[in-house]
Amino acid sequence: MPPGRLLNLNQIVAGVRPAVAVAPAKPIKIAAPVAAPAVVAPVVMAPVVAAEVVARPAVMPAMRINPALLRAQPAIIAQLEGRTVRPRLNDLRPGLFPIKADAGFVRSQSSHPISPSTTPDDRCLFEDPHSPQQRYWLPRYRVRNEGGRYEIKVAQAQDGLWAVSVAVETYPAAEIADTARSAQMLPLARNAVISYRAAGTAIEQRLPVGELIDDPRGGCVAMLRLSLAERDALLRAFMSSESQARLLISRGYTVAVPLPASPAPDAPKRQLMMIKGQMLLSRAPQASVSAAVLSHASAASLRVAPSAAPTVAVKPAAMRPAMMARGAAMPGMRMHIKRRGFDGEPIIVQPEPEPEPQPQPQPEPAPAPEPRYDVSNQSQDWAIALFFEPMLHPYLYPSGAQPGPAAPRWVVHSLRYPAGGRSHAYFQDMSDPSRIYYLPDAFKLARRSEAPHAPSLAFRIDQGTDADDAKVDLTCEVRPVTDGERLLAARRELASKVPASADNPQREFDLRLLRASSTLQLALMRDGAIRSETVPAAIDWDNGFTVNERFEFDDFQEVFAVLMSLSNSNLLQGSVVVSTGINENVMVPVKLNFADMEGELFQSIETPDPQTGAVAVRLLNATESKLRIARLPTWISRGEGLVEGRIEGLDLSQPIEIAPEQGVDFVVQPTAALSGSAPADAIFNTASVRSIPDGEAIMKYTLDETIDQETVRPVRLMTTPEVLLNAGQAAGEIASIIVEFRGNKRAVLDAANLAIDVDVPVPLMDILLRRDSEGFYEYRQTVVYRSGQSLPSTPWSRTDEPAVLIAGA
């Protein structure tokens, strides 16, 4: 079986089976570990002209779970409510991260429309990769209005549920309205949900659209099937602008976005250096003036020494008297010196015209490289406001009825997990007690979708106009994380909070993700101090948010050290403050750290035993750093059956570590009989797996590619005449001392060169990880005597000596 991505517990608690990314010989399971809100893996990016991208739905429909199944399988505990699952940041903006030399593809190789922008949206016109005259546009939507009436209908169905339909039409953005008339609509994967704010709260309720039916007149019709209580709550939301009722249509599409031009392989890179304890950025190389750019007249009138800077304009006419007085030739003349006077001054006896310089053929400029593109899978919502005054639109309500306002009553339950640990809030809607809402455990720095699953973070350095103006731009993706075991425990404890009724004698209930108004508070570096600030970020409870932060270059060392640190720090920590409107604010922690991130960690190869239900597993580390496994709770699923698993062949009595691209093998045995005939799947909870950050590997994936991964430390290498004299020693006088520095750098000291300035190579990590104020370095020396003898090179020595290194015999 080919390696697949790990099927994780949060897939099960959300009631979702993983989708297949491509069509291999055997199915590959795809999941995002321990990130309950983001339950579907992002769209897989196609290789350069390879297999076609298979787009998954951008919005998942609500799960309607059979109560009997729920009683039999209590692990299926969460319900999806029109969840919008967005691709990860590296899929949305591939050009944000360091570009490999052979990355992307040229236009003719694209199987998707070409975007003019790296961040496409509905204001762009997309071109066919092979026929540029064929263009596409991304539609916007609005409720269809015929004869002054909105096409929204509410009717009771035969099964007792209520059918609500909303007809919408498409239209282009104003910026491209004229051009769109001759263009085609971009192929889309559409899904929709109606959201509104529960009366008297800031909690968002969602009603998933069951069907989106194409309308022959253009556009589509959104169909919902609701209970009476859901219908009444929706109609109340239509009547109030404060409810902020909206139809959200998710537009999923795939285009090719331009990649930034890669620097030439031999292009010089800037370096980060420590000078006298202060971090500095070397300046970008400036274009030098060469003879090729000098005009023919200037070249003929003035010859500039190679070391001279052509900064002063000199008139040839003004130079003639002085030149003739010194016996120099005028421009265009070559002087023949026959003899010199007693004072050494040359005597000019015959001036001859200098031949006219012949124009040199100019090399033809190298052809510009063909632009390259990468696949970008987009999922963008378009919101349609649904506010209708009852007096103006009575036809929207059954029999002209106008349901009165009914503010629901909410109860907040506080449960600790684990026992004696942190308290988690659960919100129960008493107008429908079978709905209980939870919040994620935390928001954490995300990993990228492709292997190796490096941090979804990028450092870009803005050089500025002066050395003191350098700034660092940090862009990173932060995603919600929920421990599935916590939800399993909460379901058992919350069962007693649901009243039994004729409609619900078994006290069944849905555990749903809470969405509410929220703000981000984050501790950032400001003027050399750490301060907590409100950061502008759009909090998406399903997918998280993006942080864009600019800080002083001097703070780069501090920021990177905190991201690498395994200990707690205030910097880059904070919380999402949730304002529900029903009690005091609730805070969900935000943690930005390389050791504990959200996202996929492993690829798995599973071989199920059809007789026993056991699964042989090989877990492969699919990240850039070592992984430490302290515990690995396991289940086995066969179709809808789910039982706890027992690991055999892997000793976890002590934490184990797995290096990148390495793996472990073991067998998961079911602890109880499994029903069903489907192939068995091993399911894991990786919440206790931590990364041991490899700073150099992480920097390779996150740092601006114009910055060298190696820096230099200026060192003054010295010796003395007494050392070279080597008086009283049998070997005699020293001819030279050869000092070699680790990193292919060497210098030679001798009688003519007793002191040399050397730029010693130092790994950038030594500075960023504070291994030394200016970076350790290693050296060794070889002594060569005038007699021809030489001593063997000394062993490598590691030192943090100050800026002067004294070489001795």
Image: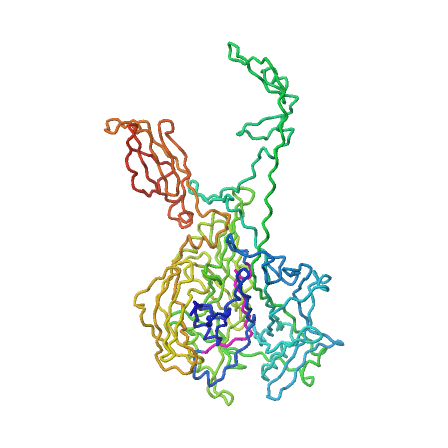
Q: Position of residue 695 (x, y in %)?
A: 41, 53
Residue 256 visible in the current orientation: yes
Marks counted in the figure total: 0
Residue 269 horizontal side relative to residue 232, left or right = left
| Place of residue 431 in the rendered image (x, y in percent of width and height, measured from the top left) | 54, 81
Q: Tell me which corner region of the image, top left, top right, bottom left or bottom right, holds residue 594.
A: bottom left
* Direction from residue 129 to residue 339 in the image, left or right: left
Position of 554 relative to 385 (above/below) = above
Please tell me which residue is depicted at 43% across the width and 46% down the height of the picture: 710
Rendered residue at 29%/42% (across/down):
795
Q: Is residue 304 magenta?
A: no
The quarter of the image holding the N terminus is: bottom left
Give the residues in magenta.
Answer: 76-93
x, y percentage for residue 327?
Answer: 58, 15
Up the image or down, 792 lies above or below 728; here it is below
Task: Residue 416: name its quadrant.
Answer: bottom left
Observer-nearest of 329 and 452: 329
Task: Describe residue 587's horizontal placement relative to residue 786 as left or right.
Answer: right
Q: Is 77 colored magenta in this rendering?
A: yes
Q: Which of 205 and 43 lies nearest the eye of the viewer?
A: 43
- In the rendering, at what x and y percent does residue 265 appear? 51, 46
Asked whether the viewer can see residue 584, the reply is no
Applied colour scheme? rainbow
Q: Residue furthest bottom?
A: 502
Q: Nearer the viewer, residue 778 or 38?
A: 778
